[in-house]
Amino acid sequence: MSGAYAQQPETETTASSKKKNVGLIVGNLVDTVNKTPVTYATVRLQLMADTLQQKSVVSDKNGSFELDKIAFGYYRLKVNAIGYSPLVMDSIHVREERFDFNLGDIKLGTSASALSEVIVYAEKPLIENTDGKITYNVGESALSNGSSTAEILKNMPLVSSDPNGKMLLRGKEPKILIDDKPVDLSAEQLQDLLESLPGGSIEKVELMLNPPPEYATEQGGVINIVTKKGRIGWVGKTTLAIGSRNEGNLSGNLSYRNKGFSFTGIAGVAGSKFNSTSYSRRENMYADSSNYLNTDGSSSSKNLRPNVRLQVDYELDKRNLLNVVYQGNLSDVDNNSTTQYTNLSAGKVVTRASTRDNATASNNTGHGFNLSYTHKGSNTAEKLRIIAGGNLNRNTNNRTFFQRYLNTDLTPSGNDSLQQQNSRNTNNNYNIRVDYNKPMFNERSSITTGATWSDSRYHNLLDTRFLRKSDSSFVDNAGLSNDFTYGQRIFTVRGGFTLAFPAEWKLIGGVQAEYTSFDFDFRRGNTLPVTHSYWNYLPNLTLRKEFDRTLNTALVYRASIRRPGMGELNPNIDYGDPYNLRYGNPYLDASLADNFDWNISWIKGKYYINGSLGFNQVKDVINSIRTLVDDGKTETTYRNISARKEYESGLWGGYTISRQLRVNASVSYSYNVYDEIGKTLYKYRDGGSFTSSFNYSYNPTSVLRFEGNARYNTYADPQGRSKSNISLNLGVQHKFFEKRLIVQLNVIDPFSTLKNTTYTYGSNYYLESFRSTVTRNFRLSFTYQLNRMVQKKVSDKEMKAAVDRVRGI
């Protein structure tokens, strides 16, 4: 340990229970102006109940310090350095449930003023809730190391995923940000990114149920993923994880900070292989008869996902900051499935049967670039931010379908067919965003304005061929082939205000004008080009009341928009299931909604409770609709169905049972009501969706942590509902070798694998679908800090000077 101990008396507490001298406090001393480390400063820790009980250390060449073997109690931290004003930090509570504290960067001002700066230390809880934003501090979670970012998100309150794996916040698709910057990717590309980004690189996740003004028009809210930043000097960490479900990943973090410059690099590779089984039972009902279609299948999937993320921050001066980010990810996926199709008469007699083998090999590459400039005014609340970025994505997808026809006794008939579908896609996006905030009237009031521009271009080339047996050659199938381009341009401009009134009332309002234009150009076939443009004006208003530090409430209105994604627009016909053809709809309109919410938050001692009630009037709802057509087949596409009323409620909170044990839980319920036209013509059904989660954390010592999560979800749509069984994730984490080595075991779904059952009710058919995916997994991960958190060696001369300063404090 680097440092000199001014006094080390043994108190009654420590004498009677030395095992409680396990406290640890670390931090970094930084010059406020030029961001350089403050070296060889004296850091003294005093027991507030008895200031004679103290210990002191010296900061190292990187400004880092470490105080260990601390007994339980409330402490005061004093920092003295030549040329700097003294700093005092009060109320650091070392106790049984919280032994170790990382104070991060402690900024020291110059000694131009003789006054000491006094800071009252406030701990960062696992979950915070301020101004409608839920912050989950996952940096030390026993569920994070060895996991992907997608897995971490699924463990958060109010976050779930639908049967197709799409991330949902309170049942809706949110906007994803990384380090406060929007991620403009398609749903498939975003899923690849979240699956490849290591969970150990995440510091915290912010859920914005009622987003800030710049994102107030997002129907599904906002999730902001904040990555870890390095401390002064070089810091490195590597993680290796292996799982019993044929999975593994290796990742490394490297960061450097000095003065106004910082660099963070994250790189890794993850791979997995998993199996699933499925079945479906469909009854087709016609005017004079009915028949049945049964399917039974199995599949396996292998994937490899390398990724890299590089970030550089440079302070031109204390008011101007540049940030550059590069994100690259690759996804290489192989899927194989076998399905048997059996057609039955009304009397359940086999009339036709076949088996189908599908093989898919896909490769996705993505490159994202981001440059941002931030200017702070003389009042730090005044801020101008400009963000420019681009995403370049490429995808190839090669699929082979081999179908064998069977006799009615399910023996091979000798007839078969072979088809191939090969697609090549490019998807490029360029965007720029400007945000400006300025305080007005008083310190808690402000105005805000901003503008955005984005330009996206998508090119899809699909070739479908079938094997002609007469000459064993492949012949093009023009009906299932396509070549088109799609372009979308969005321009927005907004203005807003925040007005603070006496008695802790606050009024927040604004309006955003949006111009959208898009075009489809079909280079094959007889489909005519599609062009469209429109303006929307989307206001928002929030009335907020702070009763005291423990109780606040807000009424929120905001107009929002949901534009269809490429997965919903793409007209390519997916021939993976010959009895259910899937394709997108290029004629979809955007869906607009009026959202009304009431939120309340109460934090009292050992518990906190948050609740919400909401009502949404949604127009031109975008939904996947399945329709029975000729020859017992169905078609699935997307439509703007009838308007929908949504009634929502949510409750989430936590309780500290003891010093070591904390629990939190969340539930949400929404009920959808469709108009009478949709119910009459298409048999749409009103229905409710329910999501729930339960989490616990238990910390018996500063180096041992247990954590767990349980989830259950069920979703309703216009044609039925889907439900899953309870999903479990249990973790235990232990730290070794002065906390440089972290060993973690995760047990995922130990009792039952993930099962999803979907019930679909069409106007003339009924369908029950089931899928079981092998999610049971025992994952072991090892994380190693490559360098010590504090340099140990201090010269005799530096030690003597430090002791002299301690004595002179």
Image: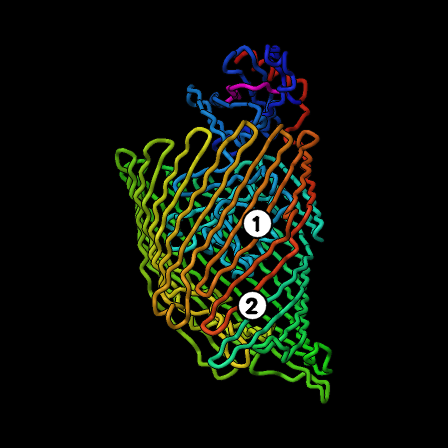
Q: Is residue 72 above or below residue 718?
A: above
Q: For residue 235, what is the image quadrant?
A: top right
Q: Is residue 109 above or below residue 733?
A: above
Q: Residue at x 63, y 15 (%)?
A: 17
Contact between marks 1 and 2 (CB within 8 A): the answer is no
Whole-percent x, y for residue 427 in the image: 53, 66
Lower sequence index among marks 1 and 2: 2
Q: Is residue 148 above or below residue 580?
A: above
Q: Which SS class for mark 2? A: strand
Asked if residue 80 lies in the magenta stretch, the reply is yes
Q: Residue at x 54, y 10 (%)?
A: 52
Q: Residues within 10 Å of mark 2 (few under 14, many from 20)?
A: some
Please tell me whether mark 1 or mark 2 is closer to you in this view: 1
Q: For residue 802, what is the image quadrant?
A: top right
Query: The residue under label 2 is which amino acid type?
Result: Thr
Query: The residue under label 1 is which amino acid type?
Result: Ile
- The answer to whether any part of residue 153 appears in the image is no
Q: For residue 96, what is the image quadrant?
A: top right
Whole-percent x, y for residue 182 in the image: 47, 53
Q: What is the magenta range?
A: 69-83
| Secondary structure that dominates the magenta span | strand
Q: Residue at x 33, y 62 (%)?
A: 536
Tag count: 2
| Gap between marks 1 and 2 measured at Cα | 38 Å
Instruction: Please identify the residue farthest to the front as the structure is shown.
Output: 347
Give the residue pinned by disc 2: 426
Whole-percent x, y for residue 779 in the image: 68, 45
Give the residue pinned by disc 1: 726
Q: Nearer the viewer, residue 293 or 264?
A: 293
Q: Is residue 610 above or below residue 214?
A: above
Give the numbered dot on residue 626: none
Q: Which SS class for mark 1? A: loop
